[in-house]
Structure formats: structure tokens, C-alpha cells
Image (tube, grey):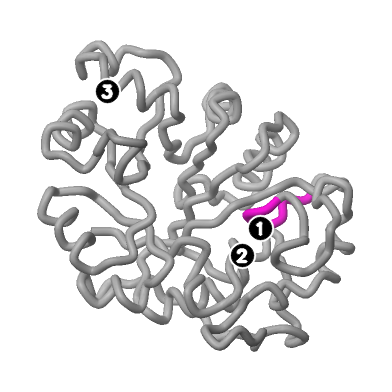
Amino acid sequence: MRVYAHRGASAECPENTLPSFRRALDLGADALELDVHLTRDRQIVVSHDGDGRRMAGVPRAIAASTLDEVRGWDAGWGFRAADGSRPFAGRGVRMPALEEVLAELPGVVINVDLKPRSDDLVEAFVALLRRRRDEGRVIAASFHHANLVGLRRRFFAGETALGRREVLQLLVLPAALWSRLPLRGTAAQLPTRVGPLKLTTPAFIARCKAARLRVDFWTVNRPAEAQALAALGVDGVMTDDPAAICPLFARDNRPQVAPSR
């Protein structure tokens, strides 16, 4: 079972930051999940939101800002502890560039969610990973089908998650027919349910396996739920709380990460 740290150890540290990613790996996460946007100067920044309001108190769009401007935002400000305090505010926590994460955490599997629908983002993303020769350790995901098609048309060599349209097709089409669809994804990364429809059923997981898809579910923060999914044969879970989930699947081949500089 692969344990992805959803935005890092986001239950303990400011999400989508290097301290959060390093903490998740220290806790035993196998992989990281993160989100990206493109700056005005075409640099890829790690952030769930399209602006700095929630995490840095800066009501400015990333797409309207340069990388240097975004680096000046205090990404530790938005994290609140259980007592309501902001323990990371003013401690130099920043929104990293994707390239910085790749360089700082070599060898770690990274699941990247391309947040906005953007041909420019897709092009910059593929170019960055090819230049760094990092396509093989990155799984690309997006809620926008056009982004996924754009990646596949550019012959992105890493895995791509299914888009919403593909999940629907998988639900209704026989596996043999689904496998003949052009430009299809290789990883079914899914919520545990969509409205009243439960996806964590043996029948649906078997359908995914018959289509030769890896199967990951999000967001799984309860140990009992993670264990139940493992018993069903899923390949991975994404969690906000690796401290709670990683010990269930601990083993000796966790990624080794260099100490902070």
C-alpha cells in the first residue's frame, strides 16, 4: 500500500511547503501529493489555491504575480494550531517552486495536481520534468480533462490519473472496451464516494484492476478506513495525517531524503 501525504503532513505543518513534505517523509510516507499553479513569469508554484489569501493573507492571484513576489509571501501564516494560534507565522515558510521540491527531495514519488485549466501550465510542466528527467517519478492529475489530454498528447512519460469523464466511462463501459479508448489515464485516483455513489466496492475496484489501473483513494484520515481499503486490494491512499496512517503500512524501503540545508 502506497501512502501519499496529501499536501504533505498538512495536519501538522503548513500545507504544500517543504517543511510539510519533509515531515511527511520523516513519518514514513511513500509519496507526496501536491498542487500547482503557474506564475506570471511562467514558473510553476506549489499551492492548492490560486491566490495567497488563505495561506499567506495576501489577496493576490498567483497567475498575476512573479515567482519572486510569491516567494515573498508568508506561507506559514495560514496554518492554525488546535488552540487557534499561528505557530509557523513569520518563520520563513514559503510557497516553493515545483522545481525546488523536485531538487530537494530526489527519488520521492510525487503526485501533482494541475489546478487551473491551462495549456501554458501543461507545457511548462512537461518541459520542466523532461529537462530534469523526472517524468518517471511523477503522477499527473487534474480535475480538467483538457489538461490531462494535453499531457498525453505531449507524450508525457509519467502516469496520468483519470479525469472525471474517464471515471464515468470506466463505471459504465466494459473493461475491454474502456482499454481501447485513446489517450486514457493509467491511475484511478478517486474519492471514496461521489454523492450517494460509493466507489470503495469490491466490484468497482475489480473493474479498475481489470482495466490495468492502479487504484488510489483520497482523502483517508481514519486508520480503520485505510485498513479496510488495503484489505480490498487498493494500491494507495492519500492522507492529511501520515502520523496516523503510515504506521499501519510501515516497511524498510521508505524514500531516503537528505537533511535540510
Q: Amino acid at mark 1?
A: Val
Q: Is residue 123 left or right of residue 246?
A: right
Magenta region, residue range: 43-49
Residue 211 quadrant? top left
Instruction: Looking at the picture, tell me which residue is in the foreground, 127 or 97.
Output: 97
Q: Identify the residue at horizontal 29%, vertical 59% (top origin).
A: 2
Q: Amino acid at mark 3?
A: Leu
**Residue 46: mark:** 1
Nearer-N-terminus badge (2/3): 2
Q: Amino acid at mark 2?
A: Val
Q: What distance separates the C-alpha of mark 3 from that of mark 1?
A: 32 Å
Q: Is residue 226 above or below residue 250?
A: above
Q: Are marks 2 and 1 in contact (CB under 8 Å)?
A: yes
Residue 229 coordinates in the image, percent (x, y): 18, 53
Q: Secondary structure at mark 1?
A: strand
- Label 3 neighbourhood size at 10 Å, few (<14), some (14-19), many (20+)? some
Residue 9 coordinates in the image, percent (x, y): 47, 73
- The stretch drawn in magenta includes residue 22: no
Nearer-N-terminus badge (2/1): 1
Q: Report which residue position mark 2 lands on.
A: 101
- Label 1 neighbourhood size at 10 Å, few (<14), some (14-19), many (20+)? many
Residue 182 coordinates in the image, percent (x, y): 42, 14
**Residue 171: mark:** 3
| Mark whose residue sits in front, 2 or 3 | 3
